[in-house]
Amino acid sequence: MQKHRPPGNLSRRALLSAAAAAGAGLAGVRSGLAGEAAKPDPLITEVQDWQRYLGDGVDKRPYGSPSKFEKHVIRRDVSWLTASAESSVNFTPLHELDGIITPSGLCFERHHGGVAEIDPAKHRLMINGLVDKPLVFTMDDIKRMPRTSRIHFLECAANSGMEWRGAQLNGCQFTHGMVHNVMYTGVPLKVLLEEAGLRPNAMWLMLEGGDASGMNRSLPLEKGLNDVLLAFAMNGEALRPEQGYPLRAVIPGWEGNLWVKWLRRIEVGDQPWQTREETSKYTDLLADGRSRKHTFVMDAKSVVTNPSPQAPLKYRGRNVLSGFAWSGRGTVTRVDVSLDGGRNWRTARIDGPVLDKSMTRFYLDFDWGGEELMVQSRAMDSTGYVQPAKSELRKVRGVNSIYHNNGIQTWLVRGNGESENVELG
Amino acid sequence: MQKHRPPGNLSRRALLSAAAAAGAGLAGVRSGLAGEAAKPDPLITEVQDWQRYLGDGVDKRPYGSPSKFEKHVIRRDVSWLTASAESSVNFTPLHELDGIITPSGLCFERHHGGVAEIDPAKHRLMINGLVDKPLVFTMDDIKRMPRTSRIHFLECAANSGMEWRGAQLNGCQFTHGMVHNVMYTGVPLKVLLEEAGLRPNAMWLMLEGGDASGMNRSLPLEKGLNDVLLAFAMNGEALRPEQGYPLRAVIPGWEGNLWVKWLRRIEVGDQPWQTREETSKYTDLLADGRSRKHTFVMDAKSVVTNPSPQAPLKYRGRNVLSGFAWSGRGTVTRVDVSLDGGRNWRTARIDGPVLDKSMTRFYLDFDWGGEELMVQSRAMDSTGYVQPAKSELRKVRGVNSIYHNNGIQTWLVRGNGESENVELG
């Protein structure tokens, strides 16, 4: 809160400094990108309140929050769509982000029994089943084992699921916002499994959450020994409650439902458990009535976040088009962007770290003359895989499933800069 | 908040699941790292409240916060040390972090007139002085220019300043906590300067803040054209108010005072301005009474954050030693750790991304038998520079200055696991 001190407390230095700036040859100053001679601008020539009065001191924000001018940047939920808010979803505001890190406060949520609020001193992880020594770990135990940090995307298998049958939701937050990208710190699951000792017939793991839904999924042991982390930190600090505090599984590149939160038990077995979440849910029903099962990997995908329905173009001339691309099979090697619905493609500028199984940022700096655009993006990954059109996906998979829609998204941008979700032929 | 529903609402699945876990051969289960047979543990055998009752739904946290069990993880200020809280400092809790990203809410603060709370719609950036076209930019103007994201550390020149004359402060948060590491997104300053057009005699820039102190510093034009960003985002979202919202300068590898927040004006000139902050402050007084001026670069430095006075060793046997290393001249290539006050050194394990002018995470996984330790770390960077002992620094620089102390830190760890800040030789 800016303190409105009486004028007697006005900082002389601030006044002089502002006066100097205001007087420093404003005749001839031009307005930013417009290139026109600037009209006398009170925002330059007059001292603003934030220059006039002292602001908050360093004792006011032991843990900081966003500016009051950013109140629109929030997760948005659809609990009206679901039976209850405890078993529902909210969405990451992708169109408000930049770079590749999703702020922890904005990472989408998907729960099956609400947020478990666990006292870490009372949390235990048990490893049992086909092991030599069943073990119970405290959080302190886990934090004494060798740890590592990696940046990975987590995408819900149902992300873009509403779009299988055609354009539905108006905004990338809703069509693509069940994804986030975080730096996790944790212990490789391999270290804990070796501690317990695997029996020769061990083939599968069952991960179980400590929430009221007892969420559980089967995971092939091979993946568990490869790159799975048991994470206790995200983006530098402890996991957030809604992301599984104090312990969650990180299953790089695989569907989010496997990343069990509030992790309390890992059982080792010789076959999958056929839990509710891998039989009645998270299987992909094909047109002929058969189902694809254990569809773990998230294929390469991308989306233009700006412009998009929640982020209109506001100016003609120079503009920045931006978006995210990711692949559960490796790194993103290239992103192409079309402004005319796929007739012509330009290679986008990939910016910042390009990491394995991480979201990757792309940009296209372009000039807009006010013409109608059909904006699309198409990701390619290190395996050579190219993100398909939705029509191609439908040919192979039908339209029964809501899972694993990684088709190309189209935004129609109108002459007034507003845009909407459309379906191309 | 966990909802305490009447028992009638108890989830049958949760009960069954917990019962299954509890019954799954608890006889023979061993306690984590202790390796002893576990006593019947009610935290395993009994259903916990967070399994019994539904938690918060997805409509409760539009913008999330840390767990209530993490309330101790905060910035700590020393406004009692300074004339006012508006011109003071607080410190990053380095010993509570992991990975390399500092959460935005925990990045240390240093203000000269408190936090300016600026309406971005009313913010302007003026570029004037030795340019062809003086320009005024709105935030929208700046966001229409080509942008990039980079992870960089920001260290106050006075970080560890109290330690010049000997060990003073008991905790790495206070000795080393005026540093943080963030992914910034912004427009290269070069792009804006080229827009304005530089006169042939342009040599220096003056950056001026829009806060009540009108903070300003001179910056060599060469640096400004090289890698300086005008950032509007940090860690994926808008800058935080206390970090310069809506616009701050990012001056990679150089002292934090140059990274002007709430940036409102850049003047181009042919010599430095000799502002208060680069004459009476931020010059390094030597033993003979002369001063080092324009000491911009932050040399290679490191600190062990765990164990440290705020983070005691709690267990014998396996332990994780951890810390940060950074260099304003490039990348960290190696970190050595000593447990015996510098007699023997072991090369630490560097983990996660190793980036230019970024903090880098190191670990040493070690066994502790309860013996007294003298813990130190020593960073090396890509120029071949080796972090010096404090005694070496004092020989060259004396003890008059509080700036640019990058000497090796020592923590004495006692047999009970508690540690303190000590001075060697």
Image (cartoon, coloured by chain):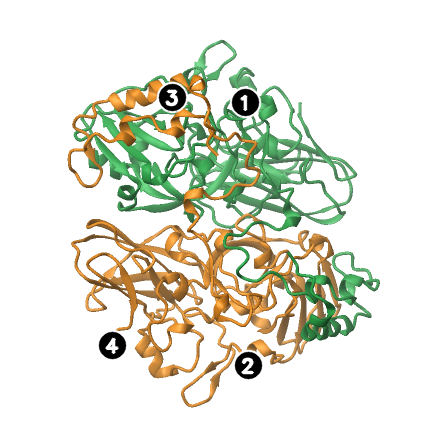
Chain colours: A green, B orange
Q: Residue at x 55, y 57 (%)?
A: A60
- Residue B268: which numbered mark, if any? none
Q: Position of residue A367 (x, y in %)?
A: 72, 48
* Residue A4 position by quadrant: bottom right
Instruction: Name above or below for residue A386 compared with residue B206.
Output: above
Pointers 1 and 2 in contact (CB under 8 A)? no
Disc 1/disc 3 C-alpha distance (Å): 17 Å
Horizontal and vertical percent for residue A196? Answer: 20, 33
Residues under numbered marks 1 and 4 in contact, where contact means CB atoms less than 8 Å apart: no
Query: Cα distance, mark 4 to mark 3?
Result: 60 Å
Q: Along the polypeptide, which appears first: circle 2 or circle 3?
A: 3
Looking at the picture, tell me which residue is in the foreground, B39 or B28: B39
- Local crowd size for mark 2, using a 10 Å CA cut-off: few (<14), some (14–19), many (≥20): few
Rounded to the nearest angstrom, the CA distance separating label 1 from label 4 is 65 Å
Q: Write down the residue under mark 2.
A: B280
User: Mark 1 packing: few (<14 Cα in 10 Å), some, or many (20+)?
Assistant: some
Q: Nearer the viewer, mark 2 or mark 3?
A: 3
Q: Name the residue tied to disc 1.
A: A84
Q: Is residue B35 left or right of residue B192?
A: left
Q: Could you tell me how far apart the alpha carbons at marks 1 and 2 are, in whole angstroms?
A: 62 Å
Q: Which residue is mark 4?
A: B425
Rendered view: B116 above or below A103: below
Identify the mark nearer the N-term, 4 or 3: 3
On whether disc 1 and disc 4 are found on a single subunit, the reply is no
Count residues near mark 3 (Cα–Cα under 10 Å), then give few for <14, some for 14-19, many for 20+.
Answer: many
Name the residue beneath numbered marker 3: B14
The residue lying at 61 percent from left, 78 percent from top is B275
Which amino acid type is shown beneath numbered disc 4? Gly
| Residue type at tag 2 | Ser
